[in-house]
Image: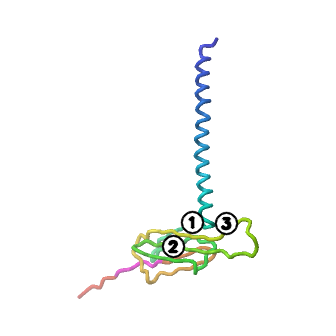
Amino acid sequence: MNPFYKKQTKENECEQEAEPESKSSMNNIFSKITSLGKNAKENTFGEFRQTPLMDLIERKNDIVLKADLPGVTKDDVTLEIQDRLLTVRAECLTDIEEGIYIRRERFYRKYEGSVNIPVQIDEEKATAKLANGVLTVFLPKKIDTIEVED
């Protein structure tokens, strides 16, 4: 009989014992993640909340924010600036079609996201436009001038 046969068998037994446990653990983790997603979807009653994808660009004279807000009109958008924190909010309801819905996932959408503005801006001169599902906010930099006395 081969002297390494028992050792080889014991190693195989350990691997075989560990393998189902590790697979079982991974399956439990994935099933929990999957069930969380299902529960979250079921618990929101058609409500869809998302942080919009945003870019913040610093240029010479201003800061530009671009945010993806698909399916939103300008009347659905609210912008708030407080202590250099710009918050973008948008809420919209989809139109109700005549008939019986077999599946409905596009009932209500809510977007909310905030970014810190790295410089002082002139809030009074800020402007925004919404085109093709992209919100663009222009925030002119605040320029402080100091008068020199004689």
Quarter of the image where the C terminus is located: bottom left
**Marked residue nearer the N-terminal end (3 or 1):** 1
Mark 1 belongs to which amino acid? Gln
Residue at the right extreme of this rendering: 99
Mark 1 lies on residue: 50
Residue at the top extreme of this rendering: 1
Real-space Cα distance between discs 3 and 1?
14 Å
Describe residue 12's horizontal placement relative to residue 86 as left or right: right
**Marked residue nearer the N-terminal end (3 or 2):** 2
Residue 38 is situated, as x and y percent measured from the top left of the image, at: 62, 56
Residue 85, picture quadrant: bottom left
Identify the magenta region.
139-144
Mark 2 lies on residue: 88
Residue 14 is situated, as x and y percent measured from the top left of the image, at: 58, 27
In this rendered view, identify the residue nearer to me: 64 or 37.
37
Tell me if residue 5 is in the magenta stretch.
no
**Marked residue nearer the N-terminal end (2 or 1):** 1
Mark 3 belongs to which amino acid? Glu
- Are the two marked residues, 3 and 1, in contact with CB atoms closer than 8 angstroms? no
Mark 3 lies on residue: 105
Numbered disc in front, either 3 or 2:
3
Position of residue 112 relative to residue 28, above or below, is: below
Real-space Cα distance between discs 3 and 2?
23 Å
Please name the residue shown 60% across and 56% down the image.
37
Badge 1 marks a residue whose secondary structure is strand
